Image (cartoon, rainbow, N blue to C red):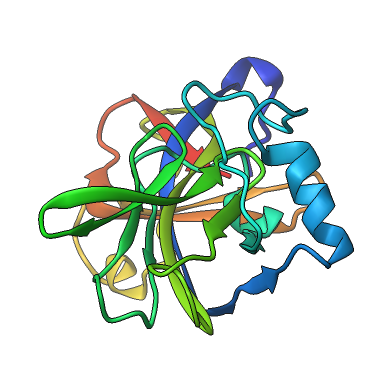
Amino acid sequence: MRYFTKNDISSEIINAKKQEKLEDIDITLYDGNDPFHSVIDLYFVKNKTKLESISNQVVEESDNYYYYQIPFENRGYGIIPTKVVITTDVTDYENIFDDGHGNLQVIIDENKIKVGNIFYNSGVILLYHNDLIENITSVDIIFKRKVEFLKREYYVNVNRNEFPTSANDTFLDSDAPYPYITNIILFNEYGEAIKKASLSKPIKTEEDMLLILEMFE
């Protein structure tokens, strides 16, 4: 059994993208009489205190807003601009999409018409209640979010004679001079298996070698 020291391990943070899809989401309509309407005005509307400062992202004041916030567990480190598509049950257009500046638009007769805003960090979606956006009961939302992975590399020096036998019974009955590595298992200090990797191609142990194992967490 092999134990690793900090000199045998390196790690780094990898930024990546992950697609998410939320289906049959109930999106709430708030009219001017609802107390939450004033909260929307306060944090998101032009010329007032904004929760997020994004270039060209301005919400127009409206008597009614459809409001939904993508949960943190789904949006993570933030939503990636230009990767948002909202499908509604409105028949005048197919999808609502974002323009990369926080504006939500529809295309009608080849014309782009703004119908709302999305705030990428907080995941807030606001749609203006008008002739194009009305009587919505639920929506589907497809988007890509930012994710971070911790990549660890384990450096394993394998000496030619370090593993002279195999767990494979067929090896014991063969004339092969060296076993092959097909699986690698990492153990913690208590002897418990915590990581296992299966190699796509067996490695023959006839020479000394350095194995670099990449693990993503």
Q: Is residue 183 left or right of residue 78?
A: left
Q: Residue 120: x percent and y percent?
A: 55, 40
**Residue 177 appears in the picture as rendered:** no
Indicate the quadrant containing the C terminus: top left, top right, bottom left or bottom right. Answer: top right
Q: Residue at x 52, y 33 (%)?
A: 151
- Which residue is at the far top? 7
Q: Is residue 204 left or right of residue 62?
A: left
Closer-to-camera residue (70/38):
38
Closer-to-camera residue (82/106):
106
- Which residue is at the far left? 110
Q: Residue at x 63, y 31 (%)?
A: 46
Q: Residue at x 83, y 49 (%)?
A: 39
Residue 132 is drawn in which quadrant?
Answer: bottom left
45 w.r.t. 64: above or below: above
Q: Residue 170: x percent and y percent?
A: 28, 73
Q: Residue 137: x percent and y percent?
A: 53, 84
72 w.r.t. 147: above or below: below
Indicate the quadrant containing the N terminus: top left, top right, bottom left or bottom right. Answer: top right
How many discs appear? Answer: 0
Residue 92 is drawn in which quadrant?
Answer: bottom left
Closer-to-camera residue (194/105):
105
**Residue 134 appears in the picture as rendered:** yes
Q: Residue 153: x percent and y percent?
A: 50, 29
44 w.r.t. 187: above or below: above
Q: Residue at x 24, y 71 (%)?
A: 94
